[in-house]
Image (spheres, rainbow, N blue to C red):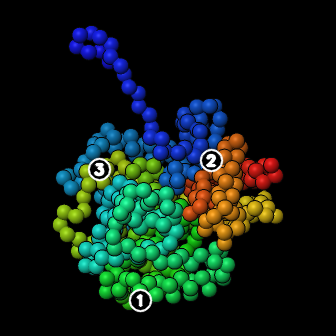
Amino acid sequence: MIDSGGTLIGMSSAALSPALKQATPVVVDYASGSWIHGTDGRDYLDFTTGIGVTSTGHCHPEVVAAAQEQCAKIIHAQYTTVMHQPLLALTDKLGDHLPAGIDSVFYANSGSEAVEAAVRLARMATGRQYIVTVQRGFHGRTVAAASLTTAGTKFSAGFGPLMAGVATTPFPDALRLQMSEEEAVAHALKEFDYLLATRVHPDELAAVLIEPFLGDGGYLAVPPAYLQGLRERTRRHGALLVLDEVQAGIGRTGEFWGHQHTADLVPDVIITAKGIASGFPISAIAAPEEIMARVWPGSQGGTYGGNAVAAAAGVATLGVIEREGLVENSRVRGGELLDGLRTGLAGIEQICDIRGTGLMLGVEFGDPAANAGGPEAADAARLATAVQQACIDEDLLTLTCGPTGSIVRIIPPLVVTAEEVATGTDRFVRAVRRVVEA
């Protein structure tokens, strides 16, 4: 920089926050489908998909074309000022997949923002204060969303006090509790009832918030009997059942919504984001109009919510998912991947569980009963991280998750092929065996 007298003065440089920890050293040159091509000249099979975001793969031609076309028309049309066609089209398209009776949609930018909008809706619609969350759930990093998150202390520690009016109920964690699923469900529902007897009066219960499939908390399916038990109890007490489908929705589990694995379950509010627009930032909450109409005037809005380019990408994304049969592809390819991992990793004693539904899979290391904390949990976390890093050497990108980091999660795009599943399975198995045999 030069001052008014022509003298060169010192320049400062900027860098990304040191708090941002990179899971891989990859710098992207370009990406397509299931592949990321790095500036290092290597081709990486991407089984992270931006943490479940690039549902139609990287740079799907139809999504790219829709975004490019929209950019030439209008980029930012603030939707409480002027309405735009892509948002109307996206609402119609999304409505084709919403349960009967859920017919009103509000748009935001991120999953966390949508979660906070759902909390606001639940409290205003019921006139009650308490939101009960389920242990190991992840709902975001903003203050209210972090207050609802129990997938790990790193998401909520260090900036308290957190939002009041939140209580947590146990997850039916059969693996960690060393119970059958039926026993774990019965235990968890009894504990929920006990919470209402000891901490949260039913007349103050606004909503129960739960992911139908745990994301950051461990890539675990919530037992259908537990979801049905929560549905019965929320109805009985006049509260709302809010399902966080941010990670499990939009075909990720082999059904369009994760909760569709539970027969006849209809929630009051659905939260969606991530895979809805193949990487463009947009999120939404959906509820019956009668419930949505109870929010106070001016309580819903936002400068960038429902952005025109993101909405156009969302319309294209849902179109691709329908035309290419990607929900079914998720179910079939996910089954192949799960079978391949279980076969290839059989007999490795350091692995306690290999699980998955659709293209949402997790491999857990260590002793599940000990993974709640302590030295054994730390050892399992180090092993999971070592495997995740070894995958990079195999040109495969994965991530870790779980309260103590003991799980490697595998999240291919919905467009993944049988050949890519086989390639990814081989690479993952090699990475695991190299780590455990070292």
For this rendering, which residue is in front, 323 or 226? 226
Q: Nearer the viewer, residue 297 or 152?
A: 152
The quadrant of the picture occupied by the N terminus is: top left
Question: Does the rendering let one see residue 333?
Answer: no
Q: Mark 2, mark 1: which one is toward the viewer?
A: 1
Determine crowd level at label 2: few under 14, some 14-19, many 20+ residues with C-alpha closer than 10 A: many
Residue 150 on image: x %, y %: 48, 67
- Marks 2 and 1 sit apart, C-alpha to C-alpha, by 46 Å
Type of the residue with mark 3 = Tyr
Look at the numbered disc 2 and give the secondary structure of its residue: strand
349 sits left or right of 65 in the view: right
The residue lying at 62 percent from left, 47 percent from top is: 397
* Residue 287, numbered label: none
The quadrant in which residue 164 appears is: bottom left
Residue 90, located in which quarter of the rendered image?
bottom left
Q: Mark 1 falls on what kind of element? A: helix
Q: Residue at x 19, y 63 (%)?
A: 298
Query: Sequence-wise, which precedes: disc 2 or disc 1?
Result: 1
Residue 115 vertical position relative to residue 165 in the rendered view, above or below: above
Q: Give the numbered dot on residue 397.
A: 2
Identify the mark at residue 304; answer none if there is no mark.
3
- Which numbered dot is residue 197? 1
Q: Position of residue 33 (x, y in %)?
A: 57, 46
Say which element carries label 3. loop
Which mark's residue is nearer the viewer, 3 or 1?
Answer: 1
On the image, the x and y values in percent for residue 435 come to 76, 50
Question: How far across and down, in percent of the image, does residue 82 sit?
Answer: 20, 52
Residue at 24% from the left image edge and 58% from the top image edge: 301
Please tell me how crowded label 3 is: few (under 14), some (14-19), or many (20+) other residues with Cα within 10 Å: some
Q: CA distance from mark 3 to mark 2?
A: 31 Å
